[in-house]
Image (tube, rainbow, N blue to C red):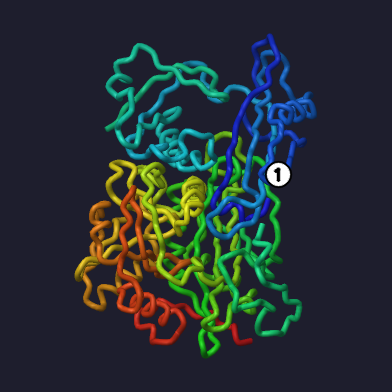
């Protein structure tokens, strides 16, 4: 599996069982007996016979099917986007994989289970991926499940995210009987407790000379697609322990269990930052401590072990230093840095992975959007990106693959990107697919608040501060679609695009045009920030971190 595809987590999993008859004893559910024989099929958007593949896998592992009455053979088909990709888009290659394991009861108790109703976290939302068996649905619930089990409960019951479902909590509490079904569970009565591959068209060549200053890359034609470099960073740790110091290793694929937490349940986080080469030959990073903090916040939400801030920053520096000849010349682009924190330990049920991998790879990049004019956005009124109680506020891999379909549809219709509305009301704007959004009217700059459904962007934070410095009143508040349509200027911010003006927004049959060009605030803010990043002006805010040893 190519580590690149783990970033946005394109993955679906399913489950079924093979049973023999008679008998009463069972074998415990666990990974220790995971079989060695897998069915693997590489595919490039072509079909195959699901049922026949399952039959072949079971037949190859037929001696692992428990005796009658002693359990079942649990079958886990996985459909994964395994092709390498840097931006949010459909993967260029997919892998269909099936593994199996003999199992017994999912819950060990013989009586009914003791379930807790969760009123903080939510599993899914309208317009999301809750209606399909996406890997993105699983890792967000691990924290809630761990907290419930540590308090003596068997499992968690989630409420709807928008309070529009058909069965109320009151009806649940008044019911005579409650039962749950699932492939692993089959049937349980429960007690309830309620508490209030890289782009083949990219123009690049690998460099083999150790002492040259730059890799042999066509710097004039850099886009935002993967250009594999020489080295990457890797570190591992067991659950509850600390990460090892890690090491720089040659860039390449990584071995991973088919039962890994990231593959089956999407337990993973990623970050994005850049290294810049200045006119005087220095190589600098933009606010890496903020990325370290955001990864730690996300790890807490997904019940993962994270590297310390110092480990994170030092690992980033080592990776850039090892790949310094891939940092573009001044003004020709930047070195995009992709830290990944993924659950690589094998786990069959939904739980924290027993082992984690912290990995960093890099790629030289140019502009995220190739058009020189402003963005042409469409407001999506069907799909939703995030919901209250979910993982929209952290950089979880699970947040990105659900937006690929609406993004693909939008681009197919001629739009640059897609703007999502809030899941609760459908009246307020939240985020574009991979960036934050601002609107301006008069001297007021407004952006939606980071209250759990919106990623707290580091570029967003920096631009807000710069706008305040030049006299604008910056407000973090709910922004309605009506206000968006009445704004004088709209722009987006993010690590990949930095600052980009929005030229038009389409909402149903309305298409609104906004101010762009030299007089636009977005143009001024883009120049202010990039001048700091490129070392053209003095960094009075101490945002830039220099990497020592780059001139050696």
Q: Is residue 340 visible?
A: yes
Q: Is residue 452 above or below residue 245?
A: above
Residue 511 figure quarter = bottom left
Residue at position x 43%, y 36% in the image: 150
Give how far across and how far down residue 259 sits, in percent. 64, 40
Give how far across and how far down residue 464 sits, in percent. 30, 69
Q: Nearer the viewer, residue 351 or 48?
A: 48
Give how far across and how far down residue 60 sits, in percent. 80, 29
Give the mark count.
1
**Which residue corresponds to mark 1?**
43
Residue 23 figure quarter = top right
What is the crowding at mark 1: few (fewer than 14 residues within 10 Å), some, or many (at least 20)? some
Q: Is residue 533 above or below residue 225?
A: below
Q: Nearer the viewer, residue 232 or 208?
A: 208
Could you tell me which secondary element the residue under label 1 belongs to?
Answer: strand
Q: From this viewpoint, which residue is outermost toward the top? A: 22
Q: Nearer the viewer, residue 464 or 271?
A: 464
Give how far across and how far down residue 416 sits, in percent. 45, 59
Residue at position x 57%, y 25% in the image: 184
Q: Is residue 133 above or below residue 42?
A: above
Residue at position x 74%, y 28% in the image: 52
Q: As drawn, is 474 to the left or to the right of 302?
A: left
């Amino acid at each position: 599996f190519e580590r690149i595809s783990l970033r946005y987590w394109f993955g679906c999993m399913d489950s079924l069982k093979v049973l023999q008859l008679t008998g009463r004893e069972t074998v415990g559910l666990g990974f220790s007996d995971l079989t060695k024989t897998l069915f693997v099929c590489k595919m490039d958007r072509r079909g195959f016979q699901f049922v026949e593949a399952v039959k072949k896998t079971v037949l190859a592992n037929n001696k692992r099917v428990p005796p009658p009455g002693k359990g079942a053979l649990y079958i886990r088909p996985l459909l994964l986007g395994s092709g390498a990709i840097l931006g949010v888009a459909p993967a260029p290659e997919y892998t269909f994989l099936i593994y199996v394991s003999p199992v017994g009861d999912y819950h060990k108790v013989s009586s009914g289970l003791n379930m807790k109703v969760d009123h903080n976290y939510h599993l899914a939302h309208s317009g999301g991926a809750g209606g399909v068996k996406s890997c993105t649905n699983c890792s967000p619930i691990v924290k809630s499940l761990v907290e419930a089990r540590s308090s003596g409960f068997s499992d968690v019951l989630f409420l709807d995210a928008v309070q529009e479902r058909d069965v109320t909590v009151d009806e649940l509490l008044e019911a005579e009987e409650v039962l749950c079904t699932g492939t692993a569970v089959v049937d349980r009565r429960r007690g309830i407790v309620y508490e209030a591959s890289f782009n083949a068209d990219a123009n690049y060549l690998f460099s083999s000379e150790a002492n040259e200053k730059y890799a042999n890359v066509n710097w004039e034609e850099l886009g935002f697609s993967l250009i594999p470099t020489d080295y990457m960073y890797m570190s591992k740790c067991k659950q509850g322990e600390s990460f090892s110091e890690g090491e720089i290793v040659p860039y390449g694929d990584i071995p991973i269990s088919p039962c890994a937490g990231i593959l089956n349940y999407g337990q993973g986080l990623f970050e994005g930052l850049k290294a810049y080469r200045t006119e005087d030959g220095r190589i600098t990073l933009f606010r890496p401590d903020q990325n370290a903090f955001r990864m730690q916040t996300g790890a807490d939400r997904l019940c993962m072990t994270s590297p310390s801030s110092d480990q994170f920053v030092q690992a980033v520096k080592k990776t850039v230093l090892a790949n310094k000849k891939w940092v573009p010349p001044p003004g020709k682009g930047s070195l995009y840095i992709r830290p990944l924190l993924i659950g690589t330990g094998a786990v069959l049920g939904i739980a924290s992975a027993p082992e984690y991998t912290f990995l960093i790879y890099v790629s030289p990049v140019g502009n995220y959007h190739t058009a020189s004019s402003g963005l042409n956005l469409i407001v999506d009124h069907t799909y939703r990106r995030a919901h209250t109680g979910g993982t929209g506020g952290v950089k979880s891999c699970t947040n990105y693959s659900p937006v690929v379909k609406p993004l693909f549809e939008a681009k197919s219709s001629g739009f640059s990107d897609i703007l999502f509305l809030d899941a609760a009301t459908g009246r307020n704007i939240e985020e574009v697919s991979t960036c934050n959004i601002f609107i301006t009217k008069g001297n007021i700059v407004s952006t939606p608040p980071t209250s759990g459904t919106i990623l707290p962007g580091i570029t967003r934070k920096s631009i807000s501060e710069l706008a305040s410095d030049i006299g604008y009143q910056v407000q973090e508040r709910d922004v309605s679609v009506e206000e968006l349509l009445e704004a004088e200027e709209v722009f987006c911010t993010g690590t990949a695009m930095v600052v980009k003006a929005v030229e038009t927004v389409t909402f149903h049959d309305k298409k609104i045009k906004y101010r762009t060009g030299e007089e636009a605030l977005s143009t001024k803010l883009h120049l202010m920030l990039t001048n700091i990043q490129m070392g053209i002006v003095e960094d009075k805010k101490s945002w830039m971190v220099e990497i020592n040893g780059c001139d050696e």
